[in-house]
Image (cartoon, rainbow, N blue to C red):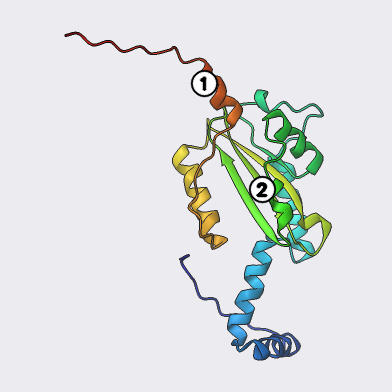
Amino acid sequence: MADKRRYTVTLPDHVADAVESRSKPLGATPTEYAADVLRWWFGQGCPPVTHDETALLANTLAKRLKPVPENLDVWSLNPKDEYVITDDNIVQKILGQLGLPNLFAAAVEHDELRMTVVFDNHQTHWLQFDFFKGGATPDMNGLAFTARPKASVTRAEMAKRMRDDAKKMESSEPATFSQIPMLEKKAASNQATTKTSSSR
């Protein structure tokens, strides 16, 4: 079970009245219902809720991230750069380059879902793919790709990020790395046949 923290907030009367009116039929306290609202917000990918926050996030990303090359090759990422891409078409092309065009095919069976898959056997980066479905607006749904350079992010740091994300999502599944099948096959084909002999 995820660790829980307590927050004390002050709400305007009209907002508090709305929370109370929604919580009563459910047999929940206003605090429990407010917690449900926050968990729902997190499940939507933590969208900004004020104009100031939207502007702040946009400025932060603009300073930290470089423009995405038109013909991005996932096998030739700059070892020092971090990549964050939320354009569905580009992310789908990257999945195709990795031989994983149907990575989230099972997601169509769900009305609301967030899935995260992290691959650790890329040569230079930790590759993370996220799928969001069920958001209130189109920009809250779709694919996202993050590539963190192994040169600056250790395996332990990446594993901690994954565990923290799993806790925040209250996931029942352990956070584990996945393998890019294409690379696994190449590694297997490079293995020399091993013969054993015994002397008597």
- Residue highlighted by disc 2: 130
- Decide if residue 117 is on the left or right side of residue 155: right
Q: Is residue 176 left or right of residue 10?
A: left
How far apart are labels 2 and 1 at the CA level?
A: 26 Å
Which image quarter is the C terminus in? top left
181 vs 149, nearest the viewer: 181
Can the viewer see residue 123?
A: no
Task: Please tell me which residue is depicted at 47% across the width and 38% down the height of the picture.
Answer: 155
Circles 2 and 1, Cβ within 8 Å, touching? The answer is no
At 75% across and 43% down in the image, what residue appears? Answer: 62
Instruction: Say if residue 108 shows up in the picture.
Output: yes
What residue sits right under mark 1 in the picture? 187
Residue located at (72% from left, 26% from top):
73
SS of the residue under disc 1 = helix
Residue 95 % position (x, y): 70, 35
Residue 88, image quadrant: top right
Relative vertical location of residue 46 with respect to residue 37 in this rendering, above or below: above
Q: Earlier in the sequence, mark 2 or mark 1?
A: 2
Give, as a three-letter code, the residue at label 1. Answer: Ala
Q: Is residue 115 above or below residue 196?
A: below
Q: Crowding near pointer 1: few (<14 within 10 Å), some, many (20+)?
A: few
Q: Determine whether 60 is above or below 138 in the image.
A: above
Residue at the far front in the pictured view: 200
What residue sits 63% from the left and 81% below the top? Answer: 33
